[in-house]
Image (cartoon, rainbow, N blue to C red):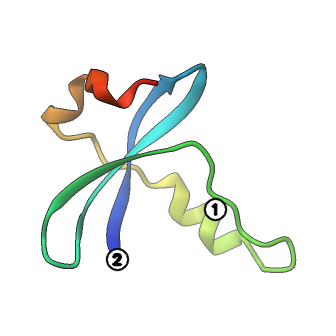
Amino acid sequence: MKLTIEQTSKIVELNGVPARIWEGHTESGIPVHCYITLVAVRDELDRSQFEKELRWQKAPSAEMGAIPLRMIL
């Protein structure tokens, strides 16, 4: 499965860990949201463009107002 996701400005706490909400879709168009706690770039690579792109954040959709209880362990 492949996902296309964009980061949002919303950060939530899951099990004591901050996680940014990313929203997107699968290749077949199914909407998804992801709770991402870490994104890393290999040390030997130039991270300047990655960091520039990471600064842009879209507003979360209205459905991201609350975390479904099934997501909390």
Q: Residue at x 23, y 70 (%)?
A: 26
* Image-based side of 36 in relation to 48, left or right: left
Q: Residue at x 69, y 61 (%)?
A: 40
Q: Which mark is residue 2?
A: 2
* Residue 67 visible, this angle: no
Q: Residue at x 34, y 63 (%)?
A: 5
Which amino acid lies under the numbered mark 1 shown in the image of this protein?
A: Glu
* Residue 47 visible, this angle: yes
The residue that mark 1 highlights is 51
Residue 34, x across and y down, in percent: 37, 49
Q: Nearer the viewer, mark 2 or mark 1?
A: 2
Residue 37, x across and y down, in percent: 58, 42
SS for dot 1: helix
* Image-based side of 57 in relation to 31, left or right: right
* Image-based side of 43 in relation to 23, left or right: right
32 or 6: nearer the viewer: 32
For the N terminus, the quadrant is: bottom left
